[in-house]
Image (cartoon, coloured by chain):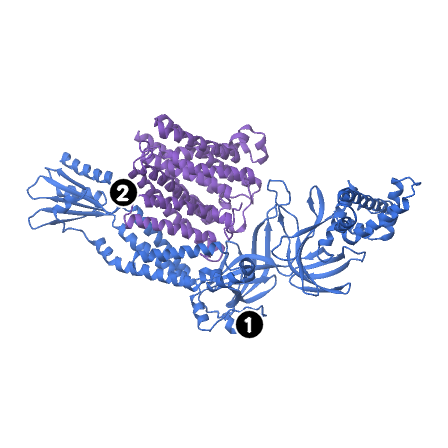
């Protein structure tokens, strides 16, 4: 098990498992995996713990094997390395010295031992001398022994880092789960009903828990998401959020967010006020508190509900994010579930190529659920957005979370308000108004003598009725049914033209009779008519015809905190430092051993250099040393 | 000669100290303790680089002169760029980077010419062009840094925060590492290979800039507002650059091994040694960068290791080169296998650098396409 092959195999496993973990998005809600892979594969993946690779038992076991294997390797090799580190190899024979590649015989008539030794020491060698039995002098020198220690440093570092990591991993929790002491809670229960089996005590030595606090709220537990459920982590103190602040860049992107916290120790009652922000955490009683994100904390909304397909008066409604409102309308009961509110929305709405993200103002997200339990999700923007040069009120709808939102775009009036469109919608649904407008349009476009006038009126109001009932789509269906194929296209364009003419006439009449309002003082009224007709027609694809207009709101924010206790961090950092030092030793320290043999009766000396790593530069280095020694003889 | 060098060194170091002192006196209110430390240690780092590598001094002096000239021309007004000829066509960050993008391809061509005709002149010309391109690219980044403050004081940040900026960084760091080794091993033949990878990056940069408008300066998200970015990112890119060079040299090695171009390319031993050296330097910096990343993550995200896709791939890259070095240093392995391995290593590195941003999402999603 201490073999390098074993270690490399284990490392490859870690590598492959890690790759799987990056490709398969981890820690997602289980439903999204079922949708993506189907029940069959979902079950297989779940049993293999592939949704949570890095916390999987088998992954931890591999890590433990790796540590053991590396430890054994270090234990086996260290003694000899340490021995080597201290040892001068002075029991070497002339024959083996001559067998090395860098072995030189130098004639040195004026041999001065001290000069030679000081030369070597100047070149960072450690020097020993030894006389053998025949009184030959052997100078043994070496440098760069740290290279060998590099081996110990790096491998020890790996062990320390892994051990630190395991300390911060969830081995303890895993064991407790296996023993049945703790288990994951799958249901969304109120805090007070969560049993102690789902709770981790505050003396738990390592955890990463989340706390979500609305402004003014206080809590003394955190939530640890785990697989498809969660655990509750008791904290040694309570955290209160006094205030939450976001700053934005002028373009609307968040620039900074910070929380004003009040921390109260459970043990000592000590109170600490502290501001934290991203990149500026704070440690209290051994637990480090990080600003991780923010979300809505139950913003209060004032809403006006309008039926887009009837003349009924709009109704006000007070709502709150994360709450549900019920409404009975036209004998049906609807529930409105308010999910989110966002003050800033950076959108890239210009269709041109260049990046042009800007803030389009607040939106809110909600679901409308009908009696049978089916729901559509809506996302509605409070302020009109500029699209194709005109302003529209925009609201998206989708039936399932997998779809993209389909947007209903209602044109803004001259005062950038929705009123114009709502007036238009009411007029459109007013039988009398429409009849009047039809009369006017037909009068102005045909001569009064025309016998067909009445027929024309009749068919036009029938056409209009069809439009009222189902928009352009309904008209398309009628055309499909009643008109021969080859004439369908021309009929359609004629119908659209007539509807537009009549609708425009309706608005012109309204303007004439209501001189006090400016809402239709538009540059291009006919374009407004067209947009408004489109919007009305699209409202038939909007799920329920109820549009929620956000009038005003009281913004309440919540701060997402992360609370971490990580005793392994120190060891990981220590190991990391050792690792860098070790790598440096291994790569940049060149170990050199050098022998000089001076036979008693010889004028020559034998110089031998070896290194355990033959880099190209060593030839040059050996040559340099030789020359330096050579030049000693000249000096002498 | 020696006196001249030491005089140059003295001037260079005094210049660095004067600049740093000026920055300290003028802007210390805007810096935290760590940033002061980074500034001071950068004086040491650049002095050391200048000391041990003569051409670096000229390069460094040139980028600062160009950057200061640009700042002088801007007069604190970003809109002036359309009116001042020198800014519009040369010294606005975008123009300087475009010049860089034009000169790297040119030097690639000349390096290939030099590979076959071996004239001294063509080699020197190619190297000079790389030097000029790198100088302009670096000045471009420095000017961009200044421009970001001109947009708004709170938008200002060091330009290594998105994919566009780090691609420029990649080009110049890879070029610098190569230029250093070009001097060390005394042959300009390898430029023909190294410049390929630099030009691939340039190609991506141009596409990214023209098709996606990526050169626009964007403000920093809160998580990136940290002094750590100034250390973590450059250290990572020294790693990436060195690994890229190693792969290209390995390619040359395999070509020589096949018996091709042997007349023109350096010997196998030289190539092998250079592969080792670049991987070694890359490995050290990559290790340091990953560790610093972990320390930063502990501060920003609440945990030193979150198995975020970028972290995980960094680990895979690290394991890959650790294995490479093991085989080379402990087992004493040489030759084809290691050469192939270092080429495969580049693909792994490229996936870590780019693929993670393209295909996977996670905490590191700062440079999306």
**A400 on left or right of B90:** right
Q: What residue is at 22 percent from the left and 43 percent from the top?
A: A122
Shown in purple, the chain is B
Q: What residue is at 64 percent from the left and 42 percent from the top?
A: A351
Tell me which numbered mark, 1 or 2, is placed earlier along the sequence: 1
Chain letter for mark 2: A
The residue nearer to you, when weighing B237 against A392, is: A392
Quadrant location of the N terminus of chain B in the rendered image: top left
Q: Secondary structure at mark 2?
A: loop
Question: Which residue, given by chain and number where applicable, does mark 1 sit on?
Answer: A194
**B245 on left or right of A600:** right
Report if residue B12 is visible in the image. no
Mark drawn on residue A571: none
Mark 2 crowdedness (10 Å alpha carbons): few <14, some 14-19, many ≥20: some
- Residue A98 position, x and y percent, is 14, 43
Report which quarter residue A31 is drawn in. Answer: bottom right
- Chain A tint in image: blue
Q: Secondary structure at mark 1?
A: loop
- Residue B347 position, x and y percent, is 42, 45
Report if residue B64 is visible in the image. yes
Question: Which residue, given by chain and number where applicable, does mark 2 sit on?
Answer: A615
Give the mark count: 2
The residue nearer to you, when weighing B162 against A450, is: A450
Report which quarter residue A559 is drawn in. Answer: bottom right
- Residue A360 position, x and y percent, is 66, 48
């Amino acid at each position: 098990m201490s073999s390098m092959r074993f270690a490399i195999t284990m490392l490859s496993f870690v590598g492959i498992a890690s790759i799987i973990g990056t490709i398969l998005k981890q820690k997602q809600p289980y439903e999204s995996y079922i949708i993506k892979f189907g029940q069959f594969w979902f079950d297989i993946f779940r049993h293999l713990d592939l949704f949570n690779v890095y916390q999987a038992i088998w992954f931890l076991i591999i890590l433990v094997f790796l540590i053991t294997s590396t430890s054994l390797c270090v234990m086996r090799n260290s003694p000899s390395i340490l021995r080597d580190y201290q040892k001068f190899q002075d029991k070497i024979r002339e024959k083996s010295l001559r067998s090395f590649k860098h072995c030189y015989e130098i004639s040195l008539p004026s041999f001065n031992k001290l000069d030679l030794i000081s030369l070597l020491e100047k070149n960072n060698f450690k020097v020993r001398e030894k006389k053998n039995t025949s009184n030959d002098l052997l100078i043994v020198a070496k440098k760069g022994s740290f290279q060998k220690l590099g081996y110990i440093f790096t491998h020890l570092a790996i062990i320390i880092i892994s051990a630190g990591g395991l300390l911060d991993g969830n081995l303890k929790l895993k064991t407790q789960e296996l023993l049945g002491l703790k288990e994951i809670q799958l249901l969304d229960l109120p805090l007070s009903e969560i049993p102690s089996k789902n709770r981790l005590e505050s003396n738990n030595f390592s955890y990463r828990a989340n706390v979500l606090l609305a402004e003014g709220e206080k809590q003394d537990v955190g939530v640890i998401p785990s697989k498809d459920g969660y655990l509750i982590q008791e904290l040694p103190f309570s955290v209160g959020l006094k205030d939450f602040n976001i700053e934005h860049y002028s373009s609307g992107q968040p620039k900074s967010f910070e929380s004003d916290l009040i921390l109260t120790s459970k043990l000592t009652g000590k109170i600490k006020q502290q501001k934290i922000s991203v990149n500026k955490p704070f440690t209290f009683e051994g637990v480090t508190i990080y600003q991780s994100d923010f979300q809505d904390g139950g913003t209060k909304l004032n809403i006006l509900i309008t039926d887009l397909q009837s003349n009924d008066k709009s109704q006000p409604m007070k709502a709150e994010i994360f709450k549900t409102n019920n409404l009975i309308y036209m004998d049906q009961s609807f529930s409105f579930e308010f999910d989110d509110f966002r003050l800033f929305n950076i959108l890239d709405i210009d269709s041109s190529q260049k990046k042009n993200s800007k803030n389009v103002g607040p939106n809110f997200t909600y679901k409308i659920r009908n009696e049978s339990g089916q729901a559509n999700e809506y996302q509605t923007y409070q302020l009109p957005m500029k699209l194709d040069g005109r302003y529209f009120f925009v609201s998206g709808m989708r039936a399932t979370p997998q779809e993209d939102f389909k947007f209903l775009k209602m044109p803004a009036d001259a005062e950038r308000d929705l009123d114009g469109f709502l007036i238009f919608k009411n007029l459109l649904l007013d039988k009398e108004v429409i009849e009047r407008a039809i009369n006017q349009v037909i009068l102005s476009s045909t001569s009064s003598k025309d016998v067909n006038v009445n027929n024309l009126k009749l068919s036009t109001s029938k056409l209009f009725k069809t439009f009222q009932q189902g928009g352009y789509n309904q008209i398309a269906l009628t055309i499909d049914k009643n008109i021969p194929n080859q004439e369908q296209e021309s009929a359609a364009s004629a119908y659209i033209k007539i509807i537009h003419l009549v609708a425009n006439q309706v608005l012109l009449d309204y303007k004439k009779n209501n001189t006090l309002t400016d809402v239709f003082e538009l540059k291009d009224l006919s374009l407004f008519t067209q947009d408004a007709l489109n919007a009305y027609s699209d409202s038939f694809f909007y799920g329920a015809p109820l549009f929620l207009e956000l009038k005003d709101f009281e913004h309440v924010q919540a701060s997402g905190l992360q609370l971490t206790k990580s005793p392994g961090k120190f060891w990981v950092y220590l190991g990391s430092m050792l690792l860098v030092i070790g790598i440096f030793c291994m790569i940049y320290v060149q170990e050199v051993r050098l022998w000089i043999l001076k036979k008693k009766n010889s004028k020559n000396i034998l110089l031998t250099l070896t290194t355990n790593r033959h880099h190209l530069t060593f030839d040059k280095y050996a040559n340099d040393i030789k020359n330096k020694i050579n030049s000693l003889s000249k000096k002498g | 000669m020696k006196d001249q060098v030491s005089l140059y060194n003295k001037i260079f170091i005094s210049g660095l100290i004067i600049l740093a002192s000026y920055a300290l006196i003028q802007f210390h209110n805007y810096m935290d303790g760590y940033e002061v430390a980074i500034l001071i240690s950068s004086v040491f780092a650049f002095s050391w680089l200048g000391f041990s590598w003569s051409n670096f001094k000229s390069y460094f002096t040139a980028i600062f002169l160009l950057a200061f000239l640009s700042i002088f021309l801007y007069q604190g007004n970003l809109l002036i760029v359309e009116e001042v000829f020198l800014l519009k066509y040369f010294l606005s960050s975008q123009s300087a980077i475009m010049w860089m993008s034009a000169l790297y391809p040119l030097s690639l061509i000349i390096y290939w010419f030099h590979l076959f005709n071996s004239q001294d002149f063509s080699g020197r010309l190619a190297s000079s062009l790389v030097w000029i391109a790198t100088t302009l690219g670096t000045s471009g980044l420095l000017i961009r840094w200044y421009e970001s403050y001109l947009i708004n004081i709170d938008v200002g940040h060091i330009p290594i925060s998105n994919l566009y900026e780090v691609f420029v960084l990649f080009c110049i760091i890879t070029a610098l590492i190569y230029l250093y080794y070009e001097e060390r091993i005394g042959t300009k033949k390898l430029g023909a290979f190294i410049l390929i990878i630099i030009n691939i990056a340039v190609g991506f940069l141009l596409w990214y800039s023209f098709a996606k408008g990526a050169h626009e300066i964007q403000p920093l998200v809160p998580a990136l507002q940290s002094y750590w970015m100034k250390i973590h990112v450059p250290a990572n890119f020294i790693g990436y650059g060195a690994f890229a060079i190693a792969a290209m040299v390995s390619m040359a090695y395999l070509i020589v091994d096949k018996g091709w171009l042997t007349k023109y390319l350096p010997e196998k031993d030289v190539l092998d040694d250079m592969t080792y050296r670049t991987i070694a330097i890359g490995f050290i910096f990559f290790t340091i960068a990953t560790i610093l990343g972990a320390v930063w993550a502990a501060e920003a995200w609440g945990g030193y290791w979150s198995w975020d896709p970028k972290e995980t791939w960094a680990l895979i890259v690290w394991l890959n080169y650790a294995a490479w070095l093991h085989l080379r240093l402990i087992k004493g392995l040489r030759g084809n296998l290691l050469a192939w391995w270092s080429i495969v290593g580049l693909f792994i590195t490229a996936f870590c650098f780019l693929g993670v941003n393209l295909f996977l999402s996670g905490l590191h999603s700062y440079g999306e396409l």
